[in-house]
Image: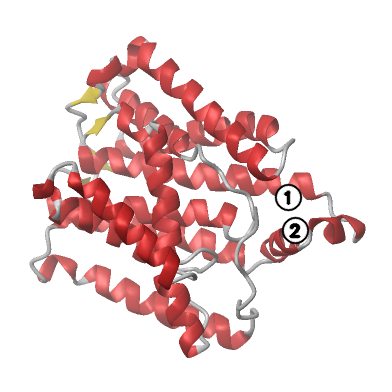
Amino acid sequence: MTAMTDDSIPVTPRAIHDEMIAFVIMTALLLVVPFTGLYPFFVMQALCFALLACAFNLLIGYGGLLSFGHAMFLGTAGYVTAHALKVWGLTPELGILAGTLGAAGLGVITGLVAIRRQGIYFAMITLALSQLLYFIYLQTPFTHGEDGIQGIPQGYLFGVFNLAKPTVLYYVIVAGFLFGFLIIFRTINSPFGEVLKAIRENEPRAISLGYKTDQYKLLAYILSGTLAGFAGALKVFVAQNASLTDVHWSMSGEIVLMTLVGGLGTVFGPVVGAFVIIAMQQYLAGFGQWVTVIQGVIFVVCVLTFRRGVIGEIAHYFRRSL
């Protein structure tokens, strides 16, 4: 599966300049959130999912690989981080590192299996692997089954920052999101990223030029899974639990939804898409199960009227790279 790139804007110094300006504006807005009266938990949760969607977008939007199992990285990192904090008594930074490394290791193992196939076969393999892990985590004692791991201590980051304080935790989450976002941004605008785009557009031609495309796709898959795991490790401190919800196939569907609503193959699209979806879940909770129906209607409308996604349409209209 390939991304929709018929109207894509070429990478130029001007395009990178536009993206950097947008990054500065986004950073400024995130820094002033605690002074605006917005609910911090909502923004922190949205930032975790925004990083997750950006990691997924790196794989599909720039590598052309559709994964239906990205929730396994989110959930695995969450479980490892939660267990490391609550049972092993590790500090927050070591817990985050353990969870991220766990997701990276999972990316290597599953990537070596899934990357052997392309298109819908790759997507189905990732979905199967994700469901396999779901049932493993359902039965494994350390995950506590359907109850999940609850009451996770937040502790002191680097022995200094008390994560039990909402404002401190918020800025730590913002710093983690910006760190992951910049890694993705640098990857996209690197020679490695250019090769990924070439593989997405025409893999046979990339092979004819001498590139070992399977190796590039595997590296992109591992990097995407690692960053998704990093988002899952951060989410543990926000929700203070790790549950099966983060490993379920429906979570993978939400990740796809966030990316498509915001704009596939855009830098800032997944961030906007994540905020839109999380905002609907947060502020439409009173509708109960109808939230899913509303999400479905919005998704259909976006697909029919905003083919490039929210940010994709804005970028196309103003001929800017976002």
**Helix, strand or loop at mark 2:** helix
Residue count near mark 1 (Cα–Cα under 10 Å), binned few <14, some 14–19, many ≥20: some
Q: Which of 201 and 25 is in front in this view?
A: 201
- Left or right of 146: which side holds 265? right
**Looking at the picture, which amino acid does disc 1 mark?**
Tyr
Q: Which residue position is annotated with label 1? A: 216
- Quadrant of the rendered structure where residue 40 is? bottom left
Q: Could you say where residue 118 lies in the image, as x and y percent from the top left?
A: 71, 43
Q: Which residue is drawn at 47% across and 25% down?
A: 131
Q: Nearer the viewer, residue 47 or 237?
A: 47
Count the labels in the image.
2
Mark nearer the viewer, 2 or 1 = 2
Q: Could you say where residue 317 lies in the image, as x and y percent from the top left?
A: 47, 87
Task: Please say if 85 is above or below 204.
Answer: above
CB under 8 Å between discs 2 and 1: yes
Residue 309 seen from this side: yes
Q: Could you say where residue 1 lies in the image, as x and y percent from the top left?
A: 65, 52
Q: Which residue is drawn at 46% across and 57% down?
A: 54
- Left or right of 84: which side holds 9? right
**Helix, strand or loop at mark 1:** helix
**Looking at the picture, which amino acid does disc 2 mark?**
Ile
Q: Residue at x 31, y 37 (%)?
A: 92
Q: Which residue position is annotated with label 2? A: 199
Label located before the other in sequence (2 or 1): 2
Residue count near mark 2 (Cα–Cα under 10 Å), binned few <14, some 14–19, many ≥20: many
Task: Please say if 12 is above or below 153.
Answer: below
